[in-house]
Image (cartoon, rainbow, N blue to C red):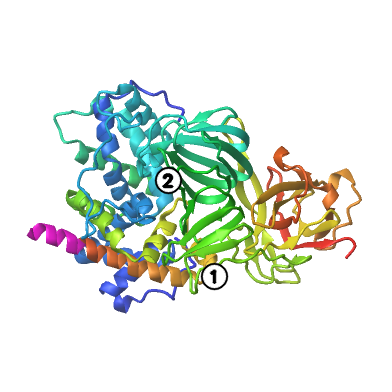
């Protein structure tokens, strides 16, 4: 970072940025699709939020403003890398709108996911842990297990589907309670 | 997107069905969707609102798992019978490292800097363990790139001999990194190579070896409070003993030198007691009973010509098949070999092969390493062996470098540029002062061949270990 840092934001502002990391990351991942890219865009988004801290009107909701900045940063990132047509089409805006709408239940979904992970058979939980360890890949897991990447990916597909169904059931049950 | 996709291309005829979408989303998040299929998927998303909503669910799950993966490694004892977790996790009052509130601007400034520097990853994705800032261990030896960070990822700092460490996480980068700690009760823990270890001691020692090699010389532990060690695939209970552990995401190997360790395989909960000179391995693909075995001597000789792709843990190199008169080989890849004192990564380009149990070969004073290599331009080539002792514990890293420019009597390269190099054991130099001689019963666990801080398109067609006088 060669730019001079502006006056540090207030502790309250930083608390909001910190609390927003998961939703920001969720939106960015939905837009740029790859974890390494999402990491980069989140960092750039944090940098922009830091720079724009003085512009933030604390009487307005923080999250929509931060998500909007994340959306802009994602589009810019995709354009720079010529990830077309995604960066160029209105599909990105439609995906962003759907993802932002989904943020309303993000915390409930997170809590449900934590519970659903615990309900998985142990070997499935460990496969999830292996897959999402920083730097991990399906190919590496397959090599470590002497199996084909396709088999690992198929197992992950079933686990992910199970988790999504479990989350929906959990939210439905909570809604009915 | 990756063109090495699974299972054939997607078919437009199925587009929009739930199975089609799940298959496509799954390939997408695993980076296994061909570019053409991704374009087809985008076309479906542009036309189909239900597909778009489903896409968002998948990607949000994928993003959430990037954060929640540590939660998948353990069963949470705080869950109720329905698997629910409390909505708010209580903060331990009085903890020195409790999460800061809005009234602690210094800490928030540090968090802000972490956010900007990318440190958010460690700060926010980790699963903090209750701990205090009391020193519980001292650093007694360090070599290479080693850093400690407190619970929650705060205060990352290079390890320095003499440092008193509170509970936290040690990360080592590069095969030539080493850190040795002594806990307040005298228990010694030695970590080598690429490794991540978390530790705490609030009256009971708890160590998590995320990956890497670790040797422990444990003092007798307090009654009823054995040392607990966890890896992605195993759990150990230690009362007082000496053992070594090697772990990655898929398996854990334990070798006990002295005493007894209770060893539990996570995947099915089976347990065994491993006593002196016993070894045991727990993996994710367990199919039979968990057994204790005596160490098996590897062969005297080893030869790898890469005729097939290898699948050892943590191996490096791009496999290239035999073609156009060229032999099958591994092509060097870039990797972080360590860091400078300023923290700048030191990049090497090389290959490594890593033995599953047992090791590749025994290694003696009259052993010789043979490698067949070629480079795009004359360059120094290094060969490093990671040795083990019979229990599987780390026995030292030993390195030799060969520079064609110094005219050291190397055989000439053939027409395709291949050169066979012989490195006698006497030419290998120890990396770590603590391991300055071949250990008794030495065996080769891992072999690295690399160029030094320069990419010279190194390729390795053969690695062999033998003896000068069989």
Residue B270 appears in view: yes
Quarter of the rendering containing residue B51: bottom left
Gap between marks 1 and 2 measured at Cα:
38 Å
Instruction: Report the side of B305 relative to B402 (left or right).
Output: left
Percent from the top left, x then y, of residue B373? Answer: 77, 58
Foreground label between 1 and 2: 2
B58 or B187, which lies in front?
B187
Q: Which residue is mark 2?
A: B225
Magenta span: A168-177
Q: Chain of mark 1?
A: A
Q: Which residue is mark 1?
A: A146
* Mark 2 residue element: loop
Q: What quarter of the picture does the C terminus of chain B occupy? A: bottom right
Q: Main SS of the magenta segment?
A: helix
Percent from the top left, x then y, of residue B71? Answer: 34, 52
Percent from the top left, x then y, of residue B225? Answer: 42, 45
Quarter of the rendering containing residue B42: bottom left
Q: Chain of mark 2?
A: B
**Residue density around tag 1, few if under 14, some if 14–19, many if 20 or more, within 10 Å:** few
Residue at 54%, 28% in the rendered image: B163
| Residue B385 belongs to magenta span | no
Q: Is residue B332 above or below residue B436?
A: below
């Amino acid at each position: 970072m060669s730019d001079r840092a502006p006056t540090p934001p207030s502790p309250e502002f930083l608390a909001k940025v910190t609390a927003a990391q998961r939703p920001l990351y969720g939106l960015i991942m939905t837009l740029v699709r790859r974890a390494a890219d999402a990491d980069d865009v989140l960092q750039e988004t944090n940098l922009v939020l830091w720079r724009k801290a003085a512009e933030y009107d604390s009487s307005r909701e923080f999250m929509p403003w931060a998500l909007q900045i994340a959306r802009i940063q994602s589009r810019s990132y995709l354009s720079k890398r010529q990830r077309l047509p995604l960066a160029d089409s209105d599909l990105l805006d439609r995906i962003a709108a759907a993802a932002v709408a989904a943020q309303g239940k993000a915390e409930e979904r997170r809590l449900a996911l934590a519970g659903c992970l615990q309900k998985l058979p142990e070997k499935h939980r460990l496969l999830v842990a292996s897959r999402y360890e920083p730097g991990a890949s399906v190919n590496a897991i397959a090599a470590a297990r002497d199996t084909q990447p396709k088999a690992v990916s198929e197992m992950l597909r079933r686990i992910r589907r199970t988790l999504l169904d479990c989350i929906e059931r959990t939210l439905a049950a909570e809604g009915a309670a | 997107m990756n063109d090495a996709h699974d299972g054939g291309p997607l078919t437009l005829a199925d587009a929009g069905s739930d199975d089609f979408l799940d298959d496509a989303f799954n390939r997408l998040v695993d980076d296994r969707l061909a570019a053409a299929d991704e374009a087809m998927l985008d076309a479906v998303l542009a036309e189909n609102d239900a597909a778009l909503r489903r896409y968002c669910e998948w990607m949000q799950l994928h993003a959430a798992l990037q954060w929640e993966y540590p939660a998948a490694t353990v069963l949470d004892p705080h869950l109720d019978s329905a698997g629910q977790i409390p909505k708010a996790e209580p903060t331990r009052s009085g903890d020195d490292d409790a999460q800061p509130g809005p009234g602690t601007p210094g800490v928030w400034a540090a968090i802000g800097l972490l956010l900007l520097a990318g440190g958010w990853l460690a700060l926010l994705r980790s699963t903090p363990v209750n701990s205090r800032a009391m020193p519980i261990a001292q650093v007694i030896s360090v070599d290479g790139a080693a850093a400690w960070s407190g619970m929650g990822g705060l205060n990352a700092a290079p390890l320095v001999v003499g440092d008193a460490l509170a509970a936290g996480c040690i990360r080592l980068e590069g095969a030539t990194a080493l850190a040795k700690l002594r806990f307040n009760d005298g228990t010694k823990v030695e970590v080598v190579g690429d490794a991540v270890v978390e530790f705490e001691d609030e009256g009971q020692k708890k160590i998590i070896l995320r990956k890497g090699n670790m040797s422990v010389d444990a003092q007798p532990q307090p009654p009823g409070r054995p040392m607990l060690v966890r890896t992605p695939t195993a759990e150990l209970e230690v009362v007082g003993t000496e053992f070594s552990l090697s772990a990655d995401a898929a398996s854990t190997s334990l070798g006990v030198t002295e005493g007894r360790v209770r060893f539990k395989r996570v995947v099915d909960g089976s347990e065994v007691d491993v006593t002196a000179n016993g070894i045991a391995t727990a993996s994710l693909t367990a199919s039979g009973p968990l057994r204790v075995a005596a160490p098996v001597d590897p062969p005297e000789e080893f030869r790898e010509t890469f005729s097939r792709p290898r699948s050892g843990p943590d191996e490096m190199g791009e496999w290239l098949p035999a073609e156009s008169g060229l032999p099958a080989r591994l092509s060097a890849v870039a990797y972080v070999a360590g860091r400078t004192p300023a923290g700048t990564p030191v990049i090497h380009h090389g290959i490594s092969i890593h033995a599953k149990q047992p090791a590749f070969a025994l290694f003696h004073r009259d052993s010789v390493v043979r490698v067949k290599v070629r480079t795009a331009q004359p360059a120094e080539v290094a060969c490093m062996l990671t040795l083990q002792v019979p229990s599987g514990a780390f026995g030292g890293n030993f390195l030799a470098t060969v520079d064609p420019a110094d005219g050291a009597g190397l055989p000439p390269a053939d027409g395709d540029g291949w050169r066979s190099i012989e490195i006698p054991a006497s030419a290998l130099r120890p990396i770590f002062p603590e391991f300055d001689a071949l250990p008794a019963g030495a065996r080769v666990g891992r072999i690295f061949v690399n160029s030094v801080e320069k990419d010279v398109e190194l390729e390795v067609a053969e690695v062999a270990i033998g003896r000068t006088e069989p």
